[in-house]
Image (cartoon, rainbow, N blue to C red):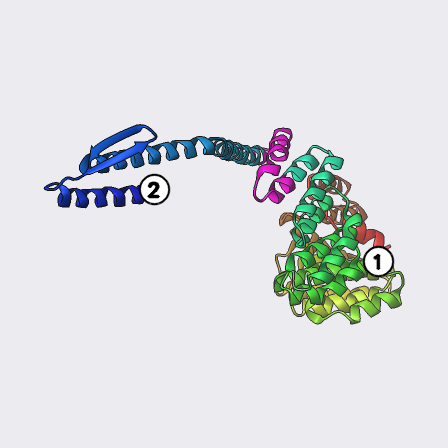
Amino acid sequence: MFYLLILCVVIGVVSVATIYVIDEPGFIMLQWGVWQVELSLVLGMLLIVLVTLLLFVGLEVLTGIVRIPGRLGRSYREYREQKKYAASVKGLKHLLLEEWAKAEQLLDASAPYLPQPVISYLAAAYAAQQQGKIARRDKYLNKARELNGDNKGLVSLISCRLRMAYGETGLVIDELKKLCAQMPKNAQAFDLLADAYEKLENWEALESLLPHLQKTRARSAEDIRTLTATITRHRLQKAQHPTELQSIWKGTPNAVQMNPNVTIAYIRKLFQYNRHQEVDKVIRGILSKRWDSELAYLYGLVNGQVEDRHLYDVANKWLESHPDDPDLLLTAGRLARRAGRLKNAEAHLKKSVELGGRREAYEELGGLLEEQHAAADAFNVYKAGTEAPVSRLQTDSQDSAG
């Protein structure tokens, strides 16, 4: 552009000068040794313009020739980068299609030529893990860490997530705790640490993490409530002594105590420690606030320490509000039988069976009919009971009650 501007200026000057000298042309004389050339002024000016033009063209051609290697090199590099970028995209497509080996090959080969190779190495690590190639996975993760400079948190989080998915949860706890200390506001780090504690069933550590989960909003309020209930349930199940069990229950917020899973875990443990009076009290207290058929069923397993007539009267009172609950009818029939009210027991059990009750209702009714010397009817009831559903709590509850 600079040379073109100079050429235009020269042509302009020559043109203006030609206009002024055309009437009095004058001459130009060039002498070199014995050689002498004489030209008119106009022709000399045209010759100067022509020489300038030739010099300009020659200079441009020479410059272009000199720049050819550099331009070819840049073009080749751009072509290679575009090709590697296309290979990276293709590798990600294979990753989505779960073609792990091909995805790993393309992502690994293209990563060094990309402006941001970290993502490709992380994707290659995932593909390697899916093939069970853990050494190669770790190699890609290390490359990603080296390239990510000071911001290694992202790579560490993904590394921990991959290792947890592969069953290496116990090996990432220290790294996750370190990440949480370095990034106290990072919700993902605390969320992942909570997942790790939950998988390892480290309920005490998980409980201590709850305030951080709330502060960082790593979990929603509903998730926190569910997690609190899960922690409490497992702590109740692992209680080694009635005193420890009572301590955990009394320290549990009322809202968590009302969670069905927590309540059932507590009642099962009370049965295990033969605390039937406490079971009677807890179930009556909870069912006065909310109805739960499972608790009504468990109430029928209370015995020994509580008078059967009292238990039956309580169950019979509940029937006024829930006359068609098959679990409550089973409990009422079972308690009426134990209290000696056989007609009431038979009526309750027959209705429970008619409403599709548990297999235990058939067993209780069959046993009652056998006691009344109705063997044929008892056989038919037992036979029908083989097709009835088995309680998911039956075995545990009966073992605990025994």
Q: Is residue 34 left or right of residue 95?
A: left
Q: In this picture, which residue range is highlighted in magenta?
A: 95-123
User: Closest to the observer: 1 or 393?
Assistant: 1
Neighbours of disc 2 within 10 Å: few (<14), some (14-19), many (20+): some
The quarter of the picture where the N terminus appears is: top left
Rendering coords of residue 80 (x, y %): 53, 32
User: Closest to the observer: 67 or 228?
Assistant: 67
Q: Nearer the viewer, mark 1 or mark 2?
A: 2
- Tell me: residue 305, above or below residue 176: below
In this rendering, does residue 258 appear at all?
no
Image point 80% across, 51% down: which residue? 396
Q: Is residue 71 left or right of residue 172?
A: left
Image point 34% across, 36% down: which residue? 56
Q: Secondary structure at mark 1?
A: loop
* Dot 1 amino acid type: Lys
User: Closest to the observer: 242 or 7?
Assistant: 7
> Which residue carries the number 2 mark?
3
In this rendering, does residue 212 appear at all?
yes
Q: Quadrant of residue 128?
A: top right
Image point 30% across, 33% down: which residue? 31
The quarter of the picture where the C terminus appears is: bottom right
Rendering coords of residue 113 (x, y %): 58, 37
Neighbours of disc 1 within 10 Å: few (<14), some (14-19), many (20+): few
Q: Secondary structure at mark 2?
A: helix
Q: Quadrant of residue 329?
A: bottom right
Rendering coords of residue 392 (x, y %): 73, 48
**Marks 1 and 2 close (CB-CB < 8 Å):** no
Q: Is residue 79 left or right of residue 322?
A: left
* Dot 2 amino acid type: Tyr
Dot label at residue 238: 1
